Amino acid sequence: MWFSRLKWIRSHSANINHIFKRHFLLGIETSCDDTGAAILSKEGTILGEALAKQPSSEFGGVVPSFAMGFHAKNLPLVTQSALDQAQMNIQDIQYLAVTIKPGLGGCLATGLDYVKYLSRKHGIPVIPIHHMEAHALTGRMLEKINFPFMVLLVSGGHCLLAIAEDVDKFKLLGQAVDNSPGEAFDKAARSLKLHSIRPDLRSVPGGRAIEIVASEGGNPKAIEFPTPLSQYMSCNFSFSGFKAQIWNILNFDAEGTSLEPDELLLNVSDVAASLQYGVARHICQRLQRGFEYVRLEEIWSPDQENTLVVSGGVACNQFIRNSIIKICDEFNTRVVFPPMKYCTDNGVMIAWNGLEKYRKGLDIIQPEQVMDLDVSPKSPLGIDISTQVTNRFIKCKWIKII
Ligand code: KG4
Ligand code: ZN
């Protein structure tokens, strides 16, 4: 009897939710190549989530026009899938949250247009979301993390170090001036031909392939990768030099084809381990300067618990993780690595950011005004204080990671 009543309640969820005025939020993410949708309750419980991932690596990167078509096709599907999991209808949703910046213009616009359509058709207010702010805040959905905390994003698309002061207040300590660490790993894996020569690595991301090969007895000190931007006392990052160094190692000729198709570098484990160490050391040095800065500026007080949240695909790398933990230990800082599925692009982080804004009454756009919303492909995270950081001339005694 209980079972049949439960079934009845679920199948009539729309009416029940309406009667009891429960609040639910649908988050939509389309800023790059993945289409995400998720439903959160007002209490922050994930009720439904769906993600359609594009096989971008098979095309050698994201193809914007293809990505737009992919989003247009998948948006109704992932939304319906999230609604089905939550056992509700679109009429049960009280707020829509959608990424409007930064990202690929056409992809952002595809997501926003879909949300405008839902908003107008069903009379649902919209909460616009900044993609990087959403990445930065996700950790708070899973653990108690008080403001201010520091956030390090290391992925295929981003690399930045920032202080989150509040839901809508961020200070950018530094960011990548060229490539991201994920790009450096992906390009190195491609140059080293790890995917074509090792069938077992064919379907793993470039960075993971480097990690696996490095773990096969690679000596991290076999090859010296110069530390990027070492002459600048900033928290900015640069990863383009790693690619150049790999090319030097491979002794590429002008066409970049010095290796035969089935030829693998004999010391490939050493190259991978040295690259991984070089990338980890660079990330950790910028992080260490960030910690020194927040101490000097008394942004963090020594008598409260200070937290670093690390997000992005590159944070899957165990060597990089352990290196970051060492720096955090030295600075008596708690480090949080949210589960990978919430660190990479997804709808849940957008819905969560929407919920954080809803709770503070921030940026809630009524259906009558949604047509005025627009996307911004370029949009820095918070206030850029990277020059202030550099002007502090913070010289560090580097903590050894190995
Ligand atoms: O955050 P993410 O999944 O996606 C976006 O950037 O949008 O990051 C993907 C990046 C890729 O470049 C991939 O090679 C890298 O994360 N990655 C790793 C590892 N797993 C994925 N890098 C280093 N070590 C890993 N284990
Ligand atoms: Zn992202």
Image: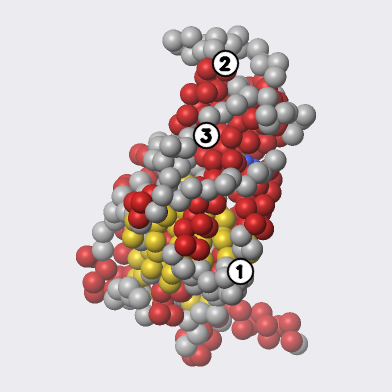
The residue at which mark 3 appears reads as 227
Q: Is residue 49 above or below residue 244?
A: below
Q: Residue at x 32, y 47 (%)?
A: 106
Instruction: Identify the mark nearer the N-term, 3 or 2.
Output: 3
Residue 284: horizontal and vertical position, in percent? 57, 47
The residue at which mark 1 appears reads as 142
Relative to 4, 81 lies left or right: left
- State the SS at label 3: loop
The residue at which mark 2 appears reads as 250
> Which amino acid type is shown beneath numbered disc 3?
Thr
Relative to 346, 358 lies left or right: left
Residue 329: horizontal and vertical position, in percent? 67, 58
- State the SS at label 2: helix
Of residue 401 and residue 394, the one placed in the foreground of this image is 394
- Corner quadrant of residue 27: bottom left
Instruction: Identify the mark nearer the N-term, 1 or 3.
Output: 1
